[in-house]
Image (cartoon, rainbow, N blue to C red):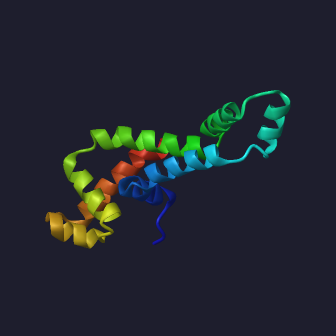
Amino acid sequence: LMADKLDRIIGDYLTGKLAANIKARELDLRARKPTDNLGIRTQSLGIAPQESEFLRVEEDELNGILGKMKRQKEILDMFWDVECSETKQALLLHYQQRMTWYGVGQEMFVGVTTLWRWNKSFKEMIRPYL
């Protein structure tokens, strides 16, 4: 069974990879030399380089990858905060510690079908927003 998009997003979130990707993206956008279209346009308009850097970041937050990742993290923060501790433990063991659901079941003394149900209900909660 191939992991779906949500599995990857949850995994990235729980391993801290999503947060790291957000930081890396921001650094990348700030480090870009103003030779891209935005830079050329802003230079001719007499806009300072740090201002064009700010505009690049802002544009990406609105319409780009940065904004998409930040929204994903915000949604996951919200639903993670209200999730029950047993489900959190199961998801952390599976997505962060890379345990199989069978391993998680043995660790937590919970049936695999129950774990699958918890995982599915967490995914169903976040799915409409991601």
Horizontal side, residue 100 vs residue 6: left or right: left
Horizontal side, residue 44 vs residue 9: left or right: right
Residue 111 versus residue 58: which sits nearer the camera? 58
Q: Residue furthest right?
A: 44
Query: For the point 37% across and 58% down, which residue is it?
Result: 15
Horizontal side, residue 22 vs residue 89: left or right: right
Query: For the point 44% across and 49% down, which residue is it?
Result: 19
Evaluate whether residue 130 shows in this view. Answer: no
Query: For the point 23% across and 72% down, which residue is it?
Result: 103
Q: Is the residue 15 above or below the residue 22 in the image? A: below
Give the image quarter of residue 48: top right
Residue 86 versus residue 24: which sits nearer the camera? 24
Residue 128 versus residue 20: which sits nearer the camera? 20
Query: For the point 46% across and 66% down, which residue is it?
Result: 3
Q: Residue furthest left?
A: 109
Q: Quadrant of the N terminus?
A: bottom left
**Looking at the picture, how far across and down is residue 49, in whole percent?**
71, 35
Give the image quarter of residue 117: bottom left
Q: Is the residue 86 above or below the residue 2 in the image? A: above
Evaluate whether residue 90 shows in this view. Answer: yes
